Amino acid sequence: MWFVNFLKSSIGKKSIMAGTGLCLFLFLCSHAAGNATLFSSVSLFQAYADQLHSHPLIVSVFSTGLFLVFAVHATTGTLLFFQNRKARPQGYRVKTRAIKTPWASMTMIYSGLFILLFALIHTAAVSFGDHGRIGETIATLFSSFFYSSFYIFSFLVLALHLSHGFWSMLQTMGANHPRYTLLIHRLTYIVPAFFLILFTSIPLLFFFGTGR
């Protein structure tokens, strides 16, 4: 019973958000490593994809787990948003924030929902085709001005989401000692900037023809 009550509380929901957020962050890191092969060649990316899909059980389990984590993260975030909105002006008591990203914080629900939309569209565009030709699929998609623009804008939104989400995750996990304040402050800019530069460089690479 105590566990159910814990999950119903703001602290419980924040813990779920931190845990699922960490899982999604680790996925983003692995996805970035895989996509980075595109800077070398489409054939290398295709070899990476072929190796990955040569283990269908692992891919299936991982994909299902990722979907569940994404669903729990989105649902909990939405519930927390309405719970906090209902509790105002008293709000939820937390320690004074060492870092303030008010605009990113206020738009978390909206940026999160947009990222969900992007994930669905991107998955449908990439995953439902022939995995044996996924490299060519990627090249075709990123040669499109509209898809490349949508992709780049989506990662701008993700960077905004991460600028607050990464900090919030660390705070929930207890990384709020004054000794780490400066490091955390820098990471809230470095981490989103790293993913933004890496992922947005890929469609630009193809759109201007050098990726092929």
Image (spheres, rainbow, N blue to C red):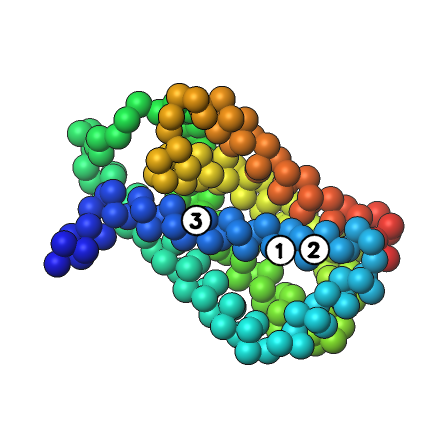
Crowdedness near tag 1: few (<14), some (14–19) or many (≥20) residues, C-alpha within 10 Å? few
- Which residue lies under the disc numbered 1? 31
- Which residue lies under the disc numbered 2? 35
- The image shows residue 22 at horizontal and vertical percentages of 45, 49
Q: Which one is nearer the viewer's eye here, 29 or 130?
A: 29
Question: Residue at the spot x=19%, y=50% of the render?
Answer: 6
- The image shows residue 148 at horizontal and vertical percentages of 70, 51
**Residue 93 vertical position relative to residue 45 in the rendered view, above or below:** above
Q: Is residue 56 visible?
A: yes
- Which residue lies under the disc numbered 3? 21
Crowdedness near tag 2: few (<14), some (14–19) or many (≥20) residues, C-alpha within 10 Å? some
Residue 1's image quarter? bottom left
Q: CA distance from mark 1 to mark 3?
A: 15 Å
Residue type pointed to by label 1:
His
Q: Are marks 1 and 3 in contact (CB under 8 Å)?
A: no
Residue type pointed to by label 3:
Gly
Q: Are marks 2 and 3 in contact (CB under 8 Å)?
A: no
Q: CA distance from mark 2 to mark 3?
A: 21 Å
Q: Point out the tag, 2 or 3, that comes first from the N-terminus.
A: 3
Q: Secondary structure at mark 1?
A: helix
Residue type pointed to by label 2:
Asn
- For this view, does 147 lie left or right of residue 71? right
